[in-house]
Image: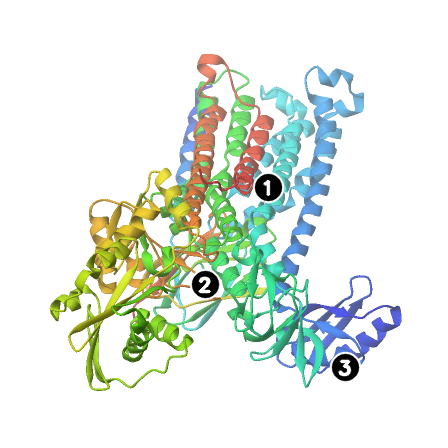
Amino acid sequence: MVLDKIVVTILGISGISFIYWFFIKKNDQQINILDSVDIIVEGGYSPNVISIAKGKTTKLNFIRKDPNTCLEEIVLGDFKIRKYLPLNQKVTIEITPQKSGEFKYSCGMSMFSGKIIVRQNTN
Amino acid sequence: MTQNKKTFLIKGIHCASCVTVLEDSLSKVNGVIKANVNLATEKATVIYDSEKATNQHFINAVSSVGYKALIDDKKDGKIDEELEKQKELRDLKIKVSVSLFLGGLILWGSFPLLMDTSPKILQNFLVQLILATPVQFWVGFGFYRATLLALKHRTANMDTLVTIGTTVAYGYSAFIALFPDITKVAGIEVMPYFDVATIIIGLILLGRYFEAKAKAGTSEAIKKLIGMQAKTARIIKDGKEQDIPIDMVKIGDLIRVRPGDKIPVDGVIVEGESSIDESMVTGESMPVDKFSSASVIGATVNKTGSFIFRATKIGKETMLAQIIKLVQEAQGSKAPIQRLADLVSSYFVPVVLMLAIVTFVVWYVFGNPPVVTFALLNMIAVLIIACPCAMGLATPTAIMVGTGKGAEYGILIKDAESLETAHKINTVIFDKTGTLTNGQPEITDVIAVNEKDQDKLLMLAGSIEKGSEHSLAQVIVKFAESKKLSLLKTEKFQAILGHGVEGVINGQRIIFGNKRLMDKEKIDIGNFGDKILKMESNGKTVMMLAVDGNFFGFIAVADIIKESAKEGTVALQKMGIEVVMITGDNQRTANAIGKSLGIKRILAEILPDQKEMEVRKIQASGKVVAMVGDGINDAPALAVADIGIAMGSGTDVAIEAADITLINKDLKSVAMAIVLSKKTIRTIKQNLFWAFGYNAILIPVAMGVLYPLFHISLNPIFASVAMATSSVSVVLNSLLLKKKKIKLN
């Protein structure tokens, strides 16, 4: 029964490669935001990577549709914000970034995350 | 249309007919879609269009039928959160009970030895399949939904691991139960593992139940602060007193406070006096006596007297609202120590999935028969034991408890980073005036060359200082005025920087200032030199006056050292922290104060704009420096220090340059803040060590690394017990911090 072992090994290697490609190598599309954005919280955040202007107040409207308690809190550590997201209610967070760069936001336990890219110009 | 829902209390409901009347009245408000009044809770719930209806409309509608609506917007969100949490805990309880009960039955009918005592029906594989199915798909529905939603985003989390682990166990067992013959032909042991799938689901949810309960405790401090807010205020309008909801109080309103009342907002007393317990807001344990023109803080409790005050700060401007905001911000910030945990968390689940595949393949290829069973059980154990939650909870729960605990003691920490840095402090620099001392100097001696000229000395000093902006000038002018001395006009007034002042009064040239000024003007102070020296050595500031070149006398001023200064500095020194005093005073005065406080390193004669430089110099010698000041005059020094600590004054707590604000004005709090930081960081380190160590040790054990040597492998049920306890234990460890008293040795 060597053949089955070879098949299992090949399937195993393929599985590992798939997991690496699917979860780790994924590329999120960046969305440019002007004034406000609705971020749907359902199994993650969509849109997940947003780009906003430096020095300008942007409204992030989080709407949690997922009852999973892992997603019940939103944390924007760099902006000192931790908020509870009641199910199916819009929670608006206003931020006025003073520094450009990439800032992570996540759920309370950092399992789900998204990115805020603060760009220099206002275009 | 923006549909909104609001719940508020109504005062005065006592019968079922009130309910109808109120519902009718609220329904008539333009924009209200539905109004519901509950007699038992005395609350109204309105669903309305927020573009048309406002709080004021509801208040008017309720008052038009003779009741009172108490609308508190800040609490709305909280009510939602509480209700959702309660519902979540109830659901979890039911699901845990169902899954553990059914899982228990399956275990009874399938576990070696134990199964001999069970009814025959429970040993039937098809019966086990029927018992396991509702657990897998009804109780476990949440895991499936979360997994699928996460997969849409190409992310994986804790639910993904549980879903895959239990589905594999359930699917494998279901196949065996449904097709035992095929299983036998394939050479696989006919042994289903329904107990594994069901009990794992039950235990993991049980872990979540306890975790949710414990987590609620971490945010207790902020809930307590929010709950402290008064609900109503008794305002005086047109000579009449009436109770109104707190959010209707306006700046300038006159408010009556009776003994035992909670002070509704911040303000200034205009009539009456009382003793006020401010411990709940400032952490100050002793009641404070307040008189006319003293400021009062909202949410503190009036003890004895009755008084009227004028509201000066309302809503978001009150001290309590600022404290709540600061604590919330601190709890929302991230500590640098968390970065590694965050990085690991983001790759954790995919890596565990890969390790689970490796486990299966290695056991299948190299393991002993029955290879499929072993390979599957070990793979499931790996998926189940991995616990990313413990890592995610390690830092934030401790930060939440730590910052909340600080607020309880009147120590407000700006963010998690400040809390983390504070434990490394090894040098504390205290600004003298206003920090170690009261900052309000008092005149201690007035000595004239001719004893009978004392009043004249004061009158001349007061007259010339009237034009000066120096902090001591005010004291002298006030003192002279309190003696009913009429001050004269000064001509040709001039301030001599770092020396004193000069001017002409009644044609006579007057100079008033320190010894340097006298030396510069070549004025002979006669045999008063020793006396002056002695006073300066006792920490007094001495200012000398000369008339037309002749020494006339001197005035000694002393700034009283705060009661808590000595204890505060000694406590720091006992912790091995160097204490430094920085002041603009002359070396002798500074030394005297330093000596009485046991401070050895004194930086005297430092001008305000040089303080920042001095802090930098000490930092350059490799020290981690905390600068303690009033936050206004020394803002640059506070900002440049590793930790700037401001002593709060009045009702303003949001001091921009400060990393930590002490609102209790007690200097022992500096040491307490450092102790709190040390304790919090210790808890975080314990949590992280536990969370990392747990995964680093138990994942390989679950993979079976101990099997070749010791024949030890992990049953997936034990894996789920370990997993459920690991995240709960991290939260409980953080909660222990709440129980710890911050004590100074």
How packed mark 3 is, by other alpha carbons closer than 10 Å (few <14, some 14-19, many 20 or more), is few
Colour setup of the view:
rainbow
Q: Is residue B302 above or below residue B618?
A: below
Residue hosting label 1 = B211
Q: Tell me whether the residue at label 1 lies in contact with that at label 3, contact meaning CB atoms closer than 8 angstroms.
A: no
Residue hosting label 2 = B653
Label 1: chain letter: B
Instruction: Tell me residue B510's x, y (percent).
Output: 21, 78
Instruction: Tell me residue B650's x, y (percent).
Output: 47, 66
Question: In the picture provided, is B265 more to the left or to the right than B668?
Answer: right
Residue A22 visible in image: no
**Both on one chain, marks 2 and 3?**
yes
Q: Is residue B554 above or below residue A14?
A: below
- Tag 3's secondary structure? loop
Check the picture and name the quadrant holding the C terminus of chain A.
bottom left
Q: Is residue B143 above or below residue B693?
A: below
Who is closer to the viewer here, A68 or B452? B452
Residue drawn at 61 percent across, 53 percent down? A67
Q: Tell me whether the residue at label 2 lies in contact with that at label 3, contact meaning CB atoms closer than 8 angstroms.
A: no
